[in-house]
Image (spheres, coloured by chain):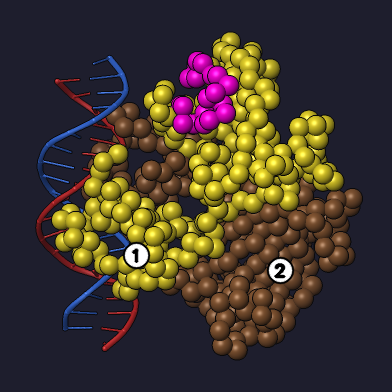
Chain colours: A yellow, B brown, C red, D blue
DNA sequence: TAGTGGTCTAGACCACCGT
DNA sequence: CGGTGGTCTAGACCACTAT
């Protein structure tokens, strides 16, 4: 993780977030980054490309690179981020309640979702996320035991992703997400402070490791009034 | 739009979509693309990077590039795509009803959303999208008249984006989206076949041109049972 | 060991923007 | 015109995977 372009990327992100490079201002040119960091132009361009991809800046031919307004879409559920990272970033008062934690043989539906052909087992983890005293989110996660052999209540209360990445040394690669709005199930009503709502926002996703292998399926059910998802998109040709 | 890397990108996309490069198969190596197209390695890498960004392939160091399973997330609302493009891609039976089309002075709220300081005018376009005979989506679009001076019923029924890009020669650059779930408004109930639902899925977005200027705000209100949004995300460091 | 993708360089030419 | 970003090249070295 110590490549030159990533460290330049990190520096620029910090400077944008702390205001050294303010919103709408022009970033230093590629050539000035070349001099300042004593690296080649291509390496600078790689950093800027990452910044552009992630919505930090916008480049205009002949003019320069400009810092985009982040405040308009600063909610980081877009992309791949864990609940714990989100809570920390947003400074939320939150509590996680472990409702279920068991290693089981998956039913045929789950076996299909996780591409399980043999008789592998699956960890089923149900967690309730309480924010400001209200039970708002029900997270239902399923992990292949082939990758995650052991899970404890402590790990689930802290951060499963942290455990997977730091302890097990697995690297998360990419995920597919699908957002829908569904009627409340009985389970939702029992486990969440659902009030009078009769629908929930549902985020279903499959998560893959960096070598492409599918290792998790999850379903995150949100009380509709507390749900927000943001996305940054570029037109591709 | 005729760069070498884009044309290689297009070729590979076609071959993936028509099955010449099947799901989960290994793509030819970078060096074989170099030979076949007689281009440098960096140019090949640029194409592959675009493919990876858009979720077509996944690269693994030491092994190769692999075609991802597209069928799992083939709904292209993610990213920037117009309603017309979507309908065509999915072969939907659809009809657009123009409910409102007027050039007006924006109220203070809209002026703020569109970053309007002077006394510029705004096109307000409300369209109802009917799919398989049911009114499912209410699209409320606001365009700065500074960029779009004239709009007609015909243009709105066809594709405003098509008009903007092809006739006006403006290039769409990027957008911020926010998805929430809100209670039905009276307007929703009147204009849509809302049935018994009392909530709608709402996608709010601002759209910028390639030079960074903000030119559109829009709010798309969907009957909740017909709403689906998909997203492909990579872990970035 | 051979093949693959990942990082980095130095240099070239082009297109676009402002003065 | 000088400054900016966009494309492309040829070559280098490295890290990882397979056999």
The residues colored magenta run A146-164
Residue D16 at x, y percent in the picture: 29, 27
- Reply above or below: C19 against B48: below
Left or right: residue A6 versus residue A168 is left
Disc sitting over residue A20 in the figure: 1
Left or right: residue A42 versus residue B70 is left
Decide: few, some or many residues near mark 2? Use Cα within 10 Å; few <14, some 14-19, many ≥20.
some
Protein chain holding label 2: B
Q: Which residue is mark 2?
A: B140
Location of the N terminus of chain A (image quadrant): top left
Residue A229 at x, y percent in the picture: 61, 51
Disc sitting over residue B148 in the figure: none
Q: Residue at x 70, y 77 (%)?
A: B124
Residue A23 at x, y percent in the picture: 43, 68
Q: Residue at x 71, y 74 (%)?
A: B125
Q: Is residue B166 visible?
A: no
Residue A204 at x, y percent in the picture: 64, 37
Secondary structure type for disc 2: strand
Q: Residue at x 54, y 59 (%)?
A: A73
Nearer the camera: disc 1 or disc 2? 1
Protein chain holding label 1: A
């Amino acid at each position: 993780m110590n490549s030159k372009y990533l460290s330049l990327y990190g520096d620029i992100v910090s400077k944008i977030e702390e205001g050294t490079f303010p919103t709408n201002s022009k970033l230093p040119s590629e050539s000035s980054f070349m001099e300042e960091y004593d690296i080649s132009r291509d390496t600078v361009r790689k950093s800027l490309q990452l910044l552009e991809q992630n919505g930090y800046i916008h480049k205009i031919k002949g003019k320069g690179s400009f810092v985009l307004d982040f405040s308009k879409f600063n909610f980081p559920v877009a992309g791949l981020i864990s609940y714990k990272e989100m809570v920390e970033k947003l400074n939320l008062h939150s509590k996680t309640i472990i409702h279920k934690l068991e290693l089981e043989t998956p039913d045929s539906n789950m076996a299909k979702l996780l591409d399980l052909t043999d008789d592998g087992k699956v960890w089923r983890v149900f967690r309730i996320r309480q924010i400001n005293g209200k039970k708002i989110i029900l997270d239902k996660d399923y992990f292949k035991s082939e990758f995650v052999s052991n899970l404890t209540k402590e790990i689930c209360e802290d951060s499963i992703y942290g455990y997977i990445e730091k302890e097990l040394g697995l690297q998360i690669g990419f995920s597919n997400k699908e957002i829908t709005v569904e009627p409340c199930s009985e389970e939702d009503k029992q486990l969440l402070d659902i009030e009078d709502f009769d629908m929930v926002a549902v985020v279903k996703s499959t998560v893959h490791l960096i070598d492409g292998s599918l290792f998790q399926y999850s379903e995150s059910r949100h009380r509709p009034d507390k749900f927000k998802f943001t996305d940054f998109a570029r037109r591709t040709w």
